[in-house]
Amino acid sequence: MRNSPMKAAVGHSTAVLASIVMAFPVYLIVVNALKTKVQSSSMGIDLPTSLEWSNFATVIDKGKLVSSFLNSMLYATASTLLGTVIAAMAAFVLSRARTPLRRFLYFFIILGIALPINFVTLTAIMQATHLINTKFGIIILYAATQIPFAVFLIYGFVATIPRELDEAAIIDGCNPLQLFFMIILPLLKPVLVTAAILNFLGVWGDFLFPLYYLNSSAHWPMTLAVYNFFGQYQQSWNLVSADILLTIIPVLAVYLLGQRFILAGLTSGSVKG
Amino acid sequence: MYAKHYPFYFLVPVLVLYFVFFILPSLLGIGYSFTDWSTYSDQISYIGLDNFRRIFSPGENYLAYMGNTLIFTAVTIILKTVIGLALAILLSEGVKRFANFYRLAIYLPAVLPTLVVALIFRSILHPATGALNMFLRSIGLDVLALPWLIDARLALYSVIGVDTWKGVGYITVILLAGLQTIPRDYYEAAEIDGAGFWARLWHVTLPMLMPAIVVITVLNVLYGLRVFDIVYALTNGGPGYATEVIYTEIFKAFSMGQYGLGTALSTVMFVVLLVAGYFVIRLLERSSGQE
């Protein structure tokens, strides 16, 4: 293909423009988080004239950011650990022993990628199991909802691990739990990291389950806390921006550190390669 | 052999959680959708098809909400696919260096929490002081500085625009991976035959990308029909009912205690998505069967 300098210049300008459009809201949040209330009133693109670092202290205090941060951390970490490990156990035996029943169960589970959740009747189940309005209940829900995609993702990866490893371990006297946790699980690490990062980001950004099932603000994750904070301080965009910035910093960190794994998860199943 | 080394109990935690918290609510929901279950009364009585008659009656607004959901789904699919394809081609052919950096920026909105994105765009789309209208006025396009989220005729398309901005990076990444699997010789052969950019796009790129396009279309259909957060946080269905979609309406029915109606709407979606799920499984089965 021809590669004139002209073509490269057009390509780069378009790509830079697209990048600016995509990153613009994050820029807007960063500059406005450091402004005074008056300067931030129109949420403009201008740089702050003075740096109001105290905005962060204010929102951490008034926005209940410490407790909501710990809640988000707990929900995202616990549900990811629980969901990923049990999904890996299931994917392992579903992939290794493809009996007609297990083929059926595999398809039954990945059907959940498409199915919606009936939030109304789920309320009744949450009440009956006494999980409504509890942190444990939210963790269980997030663990349950990630199962279909996690099983699908890990199932494909298990097939790449040679069966001879299983046989060798069995001859050495491993029982099924030892075989799985000591031999297989460490080999699944790349796909587990992918599943875990995608789930972590998903839980961090979600607010549906808390919206439906958590009345008490002491249990709110950061998303709901920031939304509620916005309701109270709509006039103070500097504080809202500071609150938003603190909420997305963990997301940005996970994204920058884990982008390789995220890409692997996104493209599996959609294209070969 | 199977039962001994790959025991069934490995499946039990997944099956229990998946069944109790995912499948069972939908199955119960089918039953409850024939009742007048609500917070107004302790009694739940069977009312036959009344909820469904109400949902599908032309005198009510539900058909309009379904229409909004379908418009949202169709337009976001078209926009995300066309823009995503353009960006993917740009990143794979238009630029040699920094492609990974651009991709990092383009995918960035996809990892931001939807709620946060919506709050930022409520400011950006503000008619008087929002960054978008300020920008349009500064380049002399005052006529385009519209009340994006306030005008009932525009609001749905503004929501679609924000959702496209957030979701297009995901489509770009998938199509970019798809583009990289197309052998270079195909393009070289087409070029020797005198094919220009559009001819190569039409005769080489699109046919070779078709499997990836089918997958993203299915994923976008699933997403579009189930859309909730972006609408809830940008407009909450308003102004009036201009942007109301199925899942914002289910949440409203739930908040108002009209459980029977809410669960009937959920059941309609369950049936629609069950059909969609059949196609998802066939697609996934095909792609995993190739490995």
Image (tube, rainbow, N blue to C red):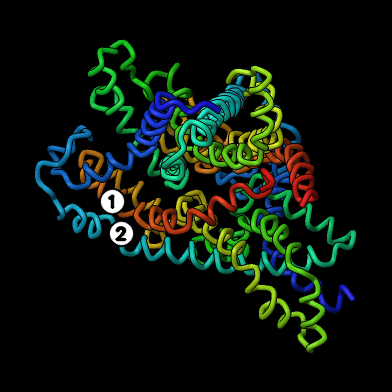
Instruction: Give residue B278's position: percent from left, percent from top.
Output: 78, 41
Q: Chain of mark 2?
A: A
Q: Residue at x 39, y 18 (%)?
A: B151
Q: Residue at x 50, y 55 (%)?
A: A203
Instruction: Give residue A202's position: percent from left, percent from top.
Output: 51, 52
**Residue at image mark 1:** A243
Q: Chain of mark 1?
A: A
Answer few, some or many: residues within 10 Å of disc 1's Cα (few below 14, many 20 plus, some between 14 and 19).
Answer: many
Instruction: Give residue B139's position: percent from left, percent from top.
Output: 25, 16
In the depicted structure, whether residue A197 falls above or below residue B127: below
Instruction: Give residue B214's position: percent from left, percent from top.
Output: 69, 34
For the N terminus of chain B, the quadrant is bottom right
Q: Are marks 1 and 2 on the same chain?
A: yes
Given the image, on which type of amino acid does mark 2 rest?
Answer: Leu
Q: Is residue A250 visible?
A: yes
Instruction: Give the camera-side residue of A260 and A142.
Output: A260
Q: Residue at x 42, y 38 (%)?
A: B233
Which quadrant of the structure image shows residue B185? top right
Q: Residue at x 43, y 59 (%)?
A: A257
Label 1: which secondary element: helix
Instruction: Answer with mark 1 or mark 2, whichever residue precedes in sequence.
Output: 2
Mark 1 and mark 2 residues within 8 Å of each other at the beta carbon: yes
Q: CA distance from mark 1 to mark 2?
A: 8 Å
Looking at this view, name the residue that lies furthest to the left.
A50
Given the image, on which type of amino acid does mark 1 rest?
Answer: Asp
Left or right of A166: which side holds A195?
left
Answer few, some or many: residues within 10 Å of disc 2's Cα (few below 14, many 20 plus, some between 14 and 19).
Answer: many
**Residue at image mark 2:** A65
Instruction: Give the camera-side residue of B36 and A273.
Output: A273
